Amino acid sequence: MEKTYKLCALNLGSTSTKVAVFENEKMVFSANVAHDANKLKEFKEIVDQFPYRKETVLAELAKQNVSLKGMDAFIGSGGGLVSLEGGTYVVNDILLHHARIGFTIKHPAQIGSLLADEFARELGGQAFVVNPPDVDEFELVARVCGWNNVSRESRGHPLNQKEVGQRYAQSIGKRYEDVNLVVCHAGGGVSISAHRKGRMIDSTDAVQGDGPMAPTRCGAVPVAAVVKMCFSGKYTERELQERIIKGGGLVDHLGTSDTREVTQRIKDGDTYAKLIYDALIYQLGKYVGAYATVLHGDVDAILITGGIAHDPYLVENLTAMVKYIAPVKVYAGELEMEAMASGALRVLTGREVAKVYSGVPVWAGFEKSTAAQAK
């Protein structure tokens, strides 16, 4: 690569903003800017945080003597958009509008595209969004469940999953669009998905109570038991929703979401901690096997990624369960900043064509979408 491209990635979380500067694929600066939780509560709407987030990020950069001048691209975390195909999107007016209002979800990530656009307008360069959480490439059959008024939708970790898919394909001299993969993202949330020739065609739902349990999430639980809890009078709707996504899994069983603490308890002889952690690993392996069948067993590799992929105990035992299916490769940690930079770099170097956000969802329910997808 003859030219050195300068890229700035901006990834917004609930109480922090991550910013990183890249020269081509090399990260030359990164910071995780913490925001005052009480200050954030003062803003009525999430998008109202925009000036405050921008100000605190710029203050941190100035403190570190880092300038954003001369960037070729700014890449913002997506969110709040309609369902769309994976890829790198140019930030346009309709994308900004949907991000600003939080068309589908309300989360600080939606401010990422607004920041990228503003910095690009002020300092030069292009503004992109790469594989936002709104990516939905499910096949029609994958959307069907046992109730005709409920459909399955894609809620996983497309940014990180597609990045490790790209990296694995490159490591064997192929393109992501030429391989079949089962990718297991194991972090605070868990998603396992089938990737066929560059498309994430099916996945467990990391948000709504599906798939394996996670450090903070319940995963799939018997529906009849949930119905009884709903009508028991012991829980409010909010309490049950929080138990699904914040208070399930390891937290519910062991009182902690920290797998390092769990593994230490196992070493100290805590047999219940071992049972629960082994069950989490067992469920990961079971769903990896299920998604291998989605690919009819034609799997080039199984990729394990996410924060708890750093744990040798988990990797060793999960690998033992699934290595008969395909080679297992580990990409520990979350590569979201790198993924954002890589997506922009592929466009800037001509290896990938940037997509244009239309504002028209690829999935809008069976009634509106079946005819179009069946063609």
Image (cartoon, rainbow, N blue to C red):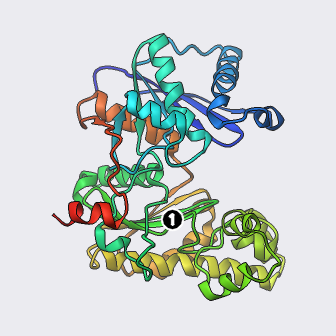
Secondary structure beneath dot 1 equals strand
- The quadrant of the rendering that contains the N terminus is top left
Find the residue positioned furthest to the left: 375
Q: In the figure, residue 54 lies in which quadrant?
A: top right
Q: Amino acid at mark 1?
A: Ser
Examine the rendered structure and indicate whether residue 29 appears above or below residue 325. above
Residue 106 point in image, percent of width and height? 59, 45
Residue under label 1, please give it: 191
Q: In the figure, residue 352 lies in which quadrant?
A: top left
Examine the rendered structure and indicate whether residue 42 appears above or below residue 190. above
The residue sitting at 42% across, 80% down in the picture is 289
Q: In this image, 193 relative to 172: left or right?
A: right
Residue 25 visible in the current orientation = no
Q: In the figure, residue 87 lies in which quadrant?
A: top left
The residue sitting at 80% across, 31% down in the picture is 39
Camera-side residue of 44 and 179: 44
Residue 28 visible in the current orientation = yes
The crowd level at tag 1 (other Cα within 10 Å; few <14, some 14-19, many 20+) is many
Q: In this image, 249 relative to 28: left or right?
A: right
Examine the rendered structure and indicate whether residue 84 appears above or below residue 370. above
The residue sitting at 37% across, 28% down in the picture is 92
Residue 236 point in image, percent of width and height? 78, 69
- The quadrant of the rendering that contains the C terminus is bottom left
The mark tally for this picture is 1
Residue 129 point in image, percent of width and height? 42, 36
Q: In this image, 217 relative to 303: left or right?
A: right
The residue sitting at 45% across, 18% down in the picture is 120
Residue 222 point in image, percent of width and height? 61, 86
